[in-house]
Amino acid sequence: MTTRHLRAALMLAAAVPLAAARAAAMLKAGHWRLYADRHRIELMPRPRRSCPDCRGAGGWWGGGANPEMEACGCWAGRRTLRITLLPERSTDPWPDEPPF
């Protein structure tokens, strides 16, 4: 390996962790969560910690006899970005059990 090839390999090896750190900082600043596996890559919105309505909790519990979580608009209105890589195979496409 020549000196030129060695220097290029070292620069590439240094660039990969730098790019990963920069991508992590951008995801955190943009309030996104990254999920990746062999079936998909997904960018999901996260609640903002500086939101005056939910204060970073993502929502609040509604009152009444059956309280439900109400999602805050700081993240619930944003769309999820998904790239499908491999289709997920289910072993049993039609389950024998009822859905309830």
Image (tube, rainbow, N blue to C red):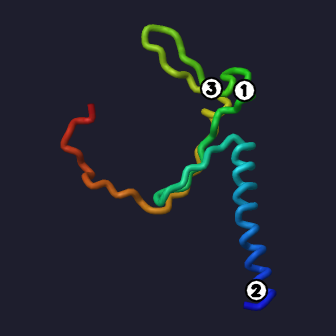
Question: Badge 1 is on which residue?
Answer: 51
Image mark count: 3
* Inter-mark Cα distance, 2 to 1: 50 Å
**Disc 3 and disc 1: Cα gap in Å?**
9 Å
Name the residue at 24% across, 48% down: 94
Which amino acid, mark 1? Cys
Q: CA distance from mark 3 to mark 2?
A: 50 Å
Which dot marks residue 1? Answer: none
User: Who's the residue at 72% across and 90% down the image?
Assistant: 1
Image quadrant assignment for residue 8? bottom right
* Residue 58 location (% of width, % of height): 61, 28
Q: Which residue is mark 3?
A: 57
Residue at position x 69%, y 23% from top? 55
The residue that disc 2 covers is 5
Q: Secondary structure at mark 2?
A: helix
Q: Pick the quarter of the image with the C terminus.
A: top left
* 10 Å crowding of disc 3: few (<14), some (14-19), many (20+): some
